């Protein structure tokens, strides 16, 4: 789901401008998969505690527990507005499957399904994620990007990184979009070549 | 600190940049003592690798002294003298566990870019464009080294910088390309390109037991070095000798049993093919000029092995797929899995089985890096490998 709230300091007009009428109009499914070089029970356990792995969302989204089996996802938007949605864990089959559904407070119904399959012949885990986005009302612009396949894949890659290596790897350029510290400070940045 | 920055095509300058910081718990900061320019850097310099940004710090072959480590690093200490592999690898993913370090699945924060361009993501690397993660490079006074518990190799003080620096790239690269050929005394092996990578491949072939090795290039000083120091038994200067004919003659019609491409995407040539590739490349219709590779495939003996070390960036034209398929050739290739070979090659250096320092042709100060690129690109002053030192 998506409820959109504004922080106190944000001017009311700003949010109006920000909220574009947005997809999805119809139900839409996004799916992506990743192979994680850890045994299934370990991956399963990690997924049960996603609030402890927020960094897999790449920084912009904070995941915290908001009650038993409930997770609240908060997206900080550049305009100091926020988008928030809450998911409830509705299905859990040890080492095999997890499913979350947006709670009744949600403006955007999202179902999240995760299936875990053992990789062929070894103790690694294939994680198949599917996001089903229901009929939406309004979604702030910044939030729309969260529901794109590329973003989902990046999130899964980061989840894999955390489970395999302990944390999300950065380069100066991956933390700072555009100009980054690993270049001469006075230089005018001309953007990517080609 | 000061660092060599890519400013534009054919423009490198020595600039003031912020000092690197620890960004991840498994990082180390290394104070660079020696670094060098690779043929791969020339591809960036010439503007053939996409996603370079003005100001990016270059360099992926370097060594130095550890000055700081992240909280998760306990096997490296400030003061350790290390050589760092050019490819960044986590040591934990399935590729790393299989010792395919240059296929590391976790080391590229920009994995999405190469995935789109190449089908799957490639590993992170130092100073090698945003396609390779946007990591700052080691042609600098200091460099941040991620996964410092996996990459850096501590090297003993009694070996000189020139002896161990090339463990970061060209020696393992040449060795891998040689190993791909499954060398033995019965085989004749031809190596296109007598640059530093070709020289390391030839020296490694020798160490691995090959007895007939043919070096191909157009610079007499490089061919001479290949013969006198690396261990080539025959040389072909393609400017005055047609290569395919010469190889046929040297192998009594069979063709070399294995062929190494140590040239890559900036191959040079004389004929129509070269003109064709060059036009397509400058019009950006083709990223690579695969001249040497085409020739290597045509030359290779039926059922033989083609080992590709030269770097290519994209998709190529007029690739001799029919000859490759119908004559049952095997292609082996890759960015070097440096970590896999470093330890054993350090042992070989210590034992005196190989001494890669024979490719050093010049010493410079890091501040002279712009001149270094210019000389190396144009092969001026009989340049082979330029070792650049930071001010003491
Ligand atoms: N696979 C890896 O991990 C890896 C690592 C390091 C370098 N490389 C690549 O290896 C290649 C060589 O690197 P280098 O440092 O030796 O560079 P270099 O530019 O010094 O050497 C290339 C040599 O090839 C010769 N050459 C050009 N066209 C030729 C042709 N048609 N036939 C025969 N020889 C020809 C040139 O005269 C030159 O001597 C580059 O493409 C570089 O990117 C790959
Ligand atoms: Zn290199
Ligand atoms: Zn890895």
Image (cartoon, coloured by chain):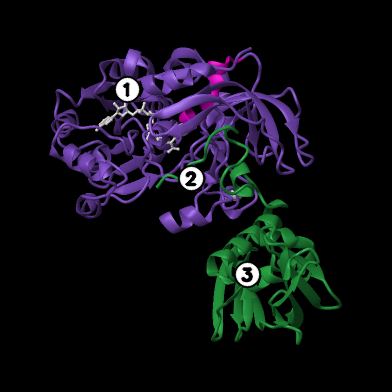
Chain colours: A green, B purple
Query: Gap in Å between the C-alphas at discs 1 and 3?
Result: 54 Å
Query: Gap in Å between the C-alphas at discs 3 and 2?
Result: 26 Å
**The quadrant where residue B181 appears:** top left
Examine the structure image and report whether residue B160 is included in the region drawn in magenta: yes
Residue furthest right in the image: A67
Closer to viewer: mark 3 or mark 2: 3
**Mark 1: few/some/many CA within 10 Å (<14, 14-19, 20+):** few
Q: Are marks 2 and 1 on the same chain?
A: no
Write down the chain letter for disc 2.
A
- The residue tagged 3 is A18
Q: What is the x, y in percent for residue B7?
A: 46, 32
Residue name at image x 59 percent, y 50 percent: B109
- The residue tagged 1 is B378
Q: Secondary structure at mark 2?
A: loop
B312 relative position to B347: left or right: left
Residue name at image x 13 percent, y 32 percent: B245
Q: Are marks 2 and 1 in contact (CB under 8 Å)?
A: no
**The quadrant where residue B243 appears:** top left
Q: What is the x, y in percent for residue B26?
A: 72, 42
Exactly how many numbered labels are in the figure?
A: 3
Question: Can residue B204 be seen in this snapshot?
Answer: yes
**Mark 3: few/some/many CA within 10 Å (<14, 14-19, 20+):** some
Write down the chain letter for disc 3.
A
Quick one: B173 or A187, which is closer to the camera?
A187
Query: Gap in Å between the C-alphas at discs 2 and 1?
Result: 28 Å
Examine the structure image and report whether residue B144 is included in the region drawn in magenta: no
Q: What is the x, y in percent for residue B304?
A: 28, 44
- The residue tagged 2 is A191
């Amino acid at each position: 789901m998506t409820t959109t709230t504004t922080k106190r300091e944000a001017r009311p007009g700003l949010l109006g401008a920000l909220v574009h009428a947005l997809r999805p109009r119809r139900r839409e499914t996004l799916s992506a998969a990743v192979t994680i070089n850890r045994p299934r029970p370990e991956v399963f356990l990690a997924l049960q505690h996603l609030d402890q792995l927020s960094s897999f969302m790449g920084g912009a989204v904070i995941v915290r527990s908001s009650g038993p089996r409930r997770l609240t996802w908060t997206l900080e938007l550049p305009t100091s507005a926020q988008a928030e949605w809450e998911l409830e864990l509705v299905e859990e089959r040890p080492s095999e499957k997890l499913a979350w559904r947006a709670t009744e407070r949600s403006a955007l119904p999202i179902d999240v399904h995760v299936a875990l399959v053992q990789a062929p012949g070894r103790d690694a885990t294939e994680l198949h994620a599917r996001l089903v986005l229901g009929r939406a009302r309004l979604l702030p612009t910044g939030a729309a990007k969260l529901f794109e396949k590329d973003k989902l894949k990046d999130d899964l890659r980061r989840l894999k990184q955390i489970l395999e290596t302990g944390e999300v790897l950065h380069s100066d350029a991956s933390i700072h979009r555009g100009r980054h510290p690993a270049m001469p400070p006075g230089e005018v940045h001309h953007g990517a070549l080609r | 600190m000061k660092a060599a920055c890519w400013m534009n095509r054919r423009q490198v300058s020595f600039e003031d940049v912020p000092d690197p910081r620890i960004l991840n718990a498994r990082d180390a900061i290394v104070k660079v003592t020696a670094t060098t320019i690779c043929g791969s850097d020339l591809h960036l310099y010439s503007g053939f690798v996409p996603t370079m940004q003005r100001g990016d710090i270059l360099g992926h072959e370097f060594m130095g002294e550890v000055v700081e480590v992240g909280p998760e690093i306990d096997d490296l200490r400030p003061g350790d003298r290390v050589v760092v592999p050019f490819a960044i690898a986590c040591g934990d993913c399935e590729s790393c566990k299989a010792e395919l370090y240059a296929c590391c699945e976790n080391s590229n924060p920009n994995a999405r870019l190469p995935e789109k361009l190449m089908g799957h993501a490639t590993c992170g690397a130092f100073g090698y464009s945003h396609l390779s993660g946007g990591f700052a490079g080691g042609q600098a006074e200091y460099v941040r080294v991620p996964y410092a518990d996996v990459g850096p190799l501590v090297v003993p003080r009694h070996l000189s910088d020139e002896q161990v620096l090339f463990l970061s790239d060209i020696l393992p690269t040449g060795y891998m390309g040689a190993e791909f050929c499954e060398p033995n005394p019965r085989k004749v092996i031809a190596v296109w390109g007598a640059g530093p990578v070709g020289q390391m491949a030839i020296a490694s072939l020798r160490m691995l037991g090959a007895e007939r090795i043919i070096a191909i290039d157009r610079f007499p000083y490089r061919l001479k070095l290949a013969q006198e120091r690396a261990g080539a038994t025959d040389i072909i200067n393609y400017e005055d000798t047609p290569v395919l004919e010469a190889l046929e003659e040297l192998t009594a019609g069979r063709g070399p049993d294995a062929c190494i491409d140590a040239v890559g995407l900036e191959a040079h040539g004389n004929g129509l093919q070269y003109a064709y590739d060059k036009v397509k490349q400058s019009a950006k219709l083709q990223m690579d000029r695969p001249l040497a590779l085409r020739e290597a495939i045509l030359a290779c003996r039926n059922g033989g092995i083609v080992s590709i070390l030269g770097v290519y960036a994209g998709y190529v034209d007029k690739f001799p797929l029919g000859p490759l398929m119908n004559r049952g050739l095997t292609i082996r290739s890759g960015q070097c899995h440096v970590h896999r070979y470093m330890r054993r090659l350090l042992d070989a250096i210590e034992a005196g089985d190989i001494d890669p320092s024979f490719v050093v042709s010049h010493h410079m100060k890091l501040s002279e890096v712009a001149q270094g690129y210019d000389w190396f690109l144009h092969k001026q002053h009989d340049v082979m490998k330029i070792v650049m030192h930071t001010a003491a």
